[in-house]
């Protein structure tokens, strides 16, 4: 006999309240996780509808007392079924409890009372209204507000309350009077907040697709019309017009009465991007972003479910928009690491989108100028289709790129972080009144403080990372926020030759300012963007040409279009190469290619300077040529040789504890167990994580590699069981990460 755990109220508060029912043998084939079922509920055995969230052979209590499921409702498959099935897949595929998975997929219902909007509806027939009106104005001293409201109702029989009391300036007592006379009725309607409600978009400039764009859209549409649904890689250089292609494809899907989701990395979710969709599709579009309140987000999901909107644009979590007939999911900048969730379930939006699309018979478009190794590999394997845009729309030339060897600079006596070539070009741009950007790979990496006598580096007492010197004179930990005053003597040897070494963004700003006293410099990093709009304010100021140079970390290279920028300087390209992580070459290539793409987007030709300590590294050479294919060819050889994703799968196990010994003990215990039970699987570790301690929590890791994803899932399940039943280390916890993006 099979038993089903069923939830009857799909809201965040009730997700863990399940009720067990028996599955009648004749329904067994038709019931899966997600299926809607009708069950007899409560004392009176009221028939109500619920959803299956788990199936098991083991009853929770006396099987005689468990009631059977009555039937399967006859209506089609509701959206809730899809979302529950998706949650179940995420739970099994990434590791989580069903509850955690459901919480990720189901939005939080707002606690506050929903907003209401009142509307006046005219109840009188046209002739009756005329009579009332004539009667009123025939009186000598009649009420003017009454007259005005009657006139308004003659023009428009349904008027929002707010308009009447606001724009028309009519007191609510007058309205209530009308209501008493049964001339009107007042209806309260649920008011869904619309984040784009007040936008007035300028009219869209019509574009005619060029030949490559046309081919991409046509081949997608031809497949779609033949019922072929699959993921496609839209591989197109920056500025090749991918967004225009997305919008055509969306149109095609909307025409068939279906809906579309557009995922965009949060950082690229700018006013300009949203505006392009809004200009084209108007009220059919809504957005999600992390600054919205839970209530506002919930409203957007409700609007999608009711059919008020057809397109949702947003970051990772927009993937769970409950559209009734989802036909297309677009993932822009699909290579972005932020598409992987850092919370359990640690899902990847790309894979999850592909699965959701399968459930609802939708297609997926993965757009990028520098595709993830995963997507390009799957395309080569024939799992994904390929749509290619090889030319920039305006046929602009790629910027000219110099690679500068920083070791050489030092040898020739230049100790500054700005190479001579970069100085020369900066001076030239300032002279000509053009804009430049300076990109520092990774915040604070170079701001550390060390003793020049003994080499001691000052570290955070809670984390295994070096402290950074800030202009406030204090030392900061970027992991936990710890601060401490700068020391004047080395805590280890007492030498007074201790100080900030090299430069973080602040230090570079000072250096550049000294070099070019008249230059107007804007700095963008985690410290200057703390306010709600800090990020956008700086970008706007730079776009308005209020500065000559924009200096910053990662944030400045993502998808912003500044036509006046003709110079991009990458200050230390290889910082991200040193990260202890198999994806570091890919990250470096992405960042450098994106950075170069920032220079020369307008009419003017551009220059890029890449400063590096490893000028011969293939990711740097390929980025300097903006040659993805060249990079891919070399990188995939390394991944294949080392059996790293995408050529194989990987399961990372992290063991964390406040006690170093507990973390060490438990990780060893897990490794021993795996070696005994799965002697053939490749296992590395346990060893300390790249950053051994964060916030006083120690972390040890081990990882496995296998061609077979399901084998890794089986190992994860076995380790979880073993850990629950027999672990000797109770003060350490474990978590799993499949095909991890970071955390080594
Ligand atoms: P991508 O997303 O590939 O970086 P966009 O879609 O943002 O490229 O296009 C870059 C610029 O070119 C935009 O300003 C866009 O409006 C314009 N554009 C795109 N396609 C065309 C076209 N067929 N004709 C004219 N302009 C176009
Ligand atoms: Zn010292
Ligand atoms: Zn710290």
Image: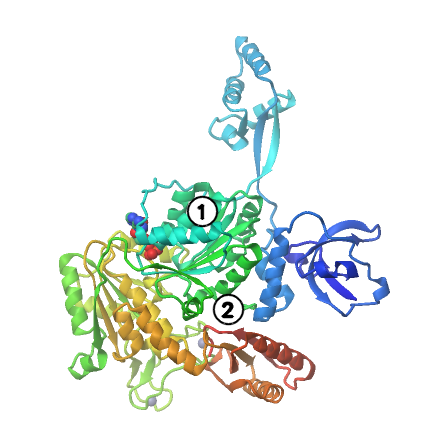
The kind of secondary structure element at disc 2 is loop
What element does badge 1 sit on?
helix
Report x, y in % for residue 414: 17, 79
Name which quarter of the figure residue 385 lies in. Answer: bottom left
Say above or below: 433 vs 507. Answer: above
Q: Between 383 and 15, which is closer to the camera in this rendering?
A: 383
Image disc number at residue 67: none
Q: Locate residue 553 relative to residue 15 in the image: left or right.
A: left
Can residue 423 be seen here? Answer: yes
Circles 1 and 2, Cβ within 8 Å, touching? The answer is: no
Please name which of the two marks, 1 or 2, marks the residue nearer to the observer: 1
What residue sits 57% from the left and 42% below the top?
115
Q: Position of residue 560 (x, y in %)?
A: 32, 57
* Quadrant of the snapshot with the N terminus: bottom right
Residue identifier under label 1: 252
Q: Specify the quadrant of the image occupied by residue 19.
A: bottom right
User: Observer-nearest residue: 413 or 169?
Assistant: 413
Look at mark 2 in the image and give the residue it sits on. 342
- The image shows residue 256 at horizontal and vertical percentages of 50, 44
Q: Is residue 330 left or right of residue 711?
A: left
Q: Residue at horizontal 30%, vertical 81%?
A: 499
- The crowd level at tag 1 (other Cα within 10 Å; few <14, some 14-19, many 20+) is many
Q: Residue at x 38, y 43 (%)?
A: 279
Residue 677 image-quadrant placement: bottom right
């Amino acid at each position: 006999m099979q038993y089903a755990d069923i939830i009857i109220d799909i809201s965040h508060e009730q997700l863990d309240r399940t009720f067990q029912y028996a599955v009648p043998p004749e329904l067994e084939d038709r019931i899966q996780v997600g299926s809607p079922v009708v069950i007899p509920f409560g004392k009176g055995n009221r028939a109500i509808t619920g959803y299956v969230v788990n199936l098991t052979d083991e009853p929770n209590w006396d099987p005689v007392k468990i009631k059977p499921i009555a039937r399967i409702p006859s209506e089609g498959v509701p959206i809730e079924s899809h979302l529950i099935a998706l949650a179940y897949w995420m739970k099994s595929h990434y590791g989580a409890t069903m509850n955690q998975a459901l919480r990720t997929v189901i939005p939080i219902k707002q606690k506050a009372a929903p907003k209401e909007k009142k509307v006046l509806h005219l109840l009188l027939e046209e002739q009756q209204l005329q009579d009332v009106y004539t009667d009123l104005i025939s009186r000598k001293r009649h009420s003017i507000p009454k007259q005005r409201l009657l006139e308004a109702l003659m023009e428009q029989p349904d008027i929002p309350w707010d308009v009447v009391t606001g724009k028309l300036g009519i007191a609510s007592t007058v309205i209530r009077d009308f209501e008493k006379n049964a001339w009107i009725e007042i209806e309260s309607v649920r008011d869904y907040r619309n984040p784009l409600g007040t936008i007035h978009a300028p009219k869209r400039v019509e574009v005619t697709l060029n030949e490559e764009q046309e081919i991409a859209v046509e081949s997608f549409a031809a497949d779609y019309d033949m019922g072929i649904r699959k993921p496609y890689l839209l591989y197109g250089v920056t500025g090749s017009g991918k967004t225009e292609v997305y919008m055509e494809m969306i149109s095609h899907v909307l025409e068939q009465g279906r809906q579309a989701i557009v995922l965009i990395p949060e950082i690229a979710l700018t006013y300009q991007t949203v505006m392009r969709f809004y200009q084209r599709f108007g009220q059919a579009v809504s957005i999600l972003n992390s600054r919205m309140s839970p209530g506002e987000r919930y409203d957007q999901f409700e609007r999608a479910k009711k059919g008020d909107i057809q397109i949702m644009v947003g970051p990772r979590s927009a993937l769970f928009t409950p559209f009734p007939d989802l036909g297309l999911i677009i993932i822009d900048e699909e290579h972005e690491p932020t598409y992987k969730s850092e919370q359990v379930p640690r899902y990847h939006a790309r894979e999850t989108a592909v699965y959701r699309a399968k459930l609802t018979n939708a297609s997926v478009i993965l757009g990028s100028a520098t595709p993830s190794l995963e997507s390009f590999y799957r395309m080569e394997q024939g799992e994904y289709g390929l749509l290619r845009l090889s030319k920039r729309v305006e046929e602009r030339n790629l910027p000219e790129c110099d690679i500068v060897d920083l070791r050489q600079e030092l040898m020739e006596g230049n100790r500054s972080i700005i190479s001579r070539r970069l100085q020369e070009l900066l001076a030239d741009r300032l002279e000509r009144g053009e804009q430049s950007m300076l990109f520092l790979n990774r915040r604070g990496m170079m701001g550390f403080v060390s003793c020049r006598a003994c080499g001691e580096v000052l570290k955070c007492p809670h984390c295994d990372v070096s402290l950074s010197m800030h202009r406030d004179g204090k030392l900061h930990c970027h992991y936990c926020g710890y601060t401490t005053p700068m020391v004047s003597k080395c805590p280890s040897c007492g030498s007074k030759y201790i100080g900030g070494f090299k430069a973080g963004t602040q230090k570079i700003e000072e250096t550049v300012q000294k070099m070019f006293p008249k230059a107007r410099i804007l700095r963008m990093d985690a410290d200057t963007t703390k306010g709600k709009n800090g990020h956008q304010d700086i970008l706007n100021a730079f776009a308005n040409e209020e500065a000559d140079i924009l200096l910053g970390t990662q944030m400045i290279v993502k998808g912003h279009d500044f036509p006046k920028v003709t110079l991009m300087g990458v200050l230390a390209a290889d910082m991200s190469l040193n990260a202890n992580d198999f994806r570091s070459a890919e990250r470096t290539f992405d960042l450098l290619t994106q950075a170069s793409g920032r220079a020369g987007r307008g009419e003017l030709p551009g220059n890029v300077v890449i400063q590096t300590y490893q000028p011969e590294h293939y990711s740097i050479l390929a980025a300097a040529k903006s040659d993805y294919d060249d990079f891919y060819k070399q990188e995939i050889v390394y991944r294949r040789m080392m059996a790293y994703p995408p050529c194989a799968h990987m399961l990372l196990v992290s063991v964390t504890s406040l006690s170093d010994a507990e973390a060490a003990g438990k990780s060893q215990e897990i490794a021993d167990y795996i070696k005994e039970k799965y002697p053939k699987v490749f296992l590395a570790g346990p060893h300390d994580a790249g950053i051994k301690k964060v916030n006083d929590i120690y972390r040890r890791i081990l990882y496995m590699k296998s061609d077979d994803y399901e084998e890794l899932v089986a190992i994860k399940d076995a380790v979880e069981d073993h850990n629950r039943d027999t672990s000797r280390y109770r003060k350490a916890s474990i978590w799993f990460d499949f095909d991890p993006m970071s955390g080594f």
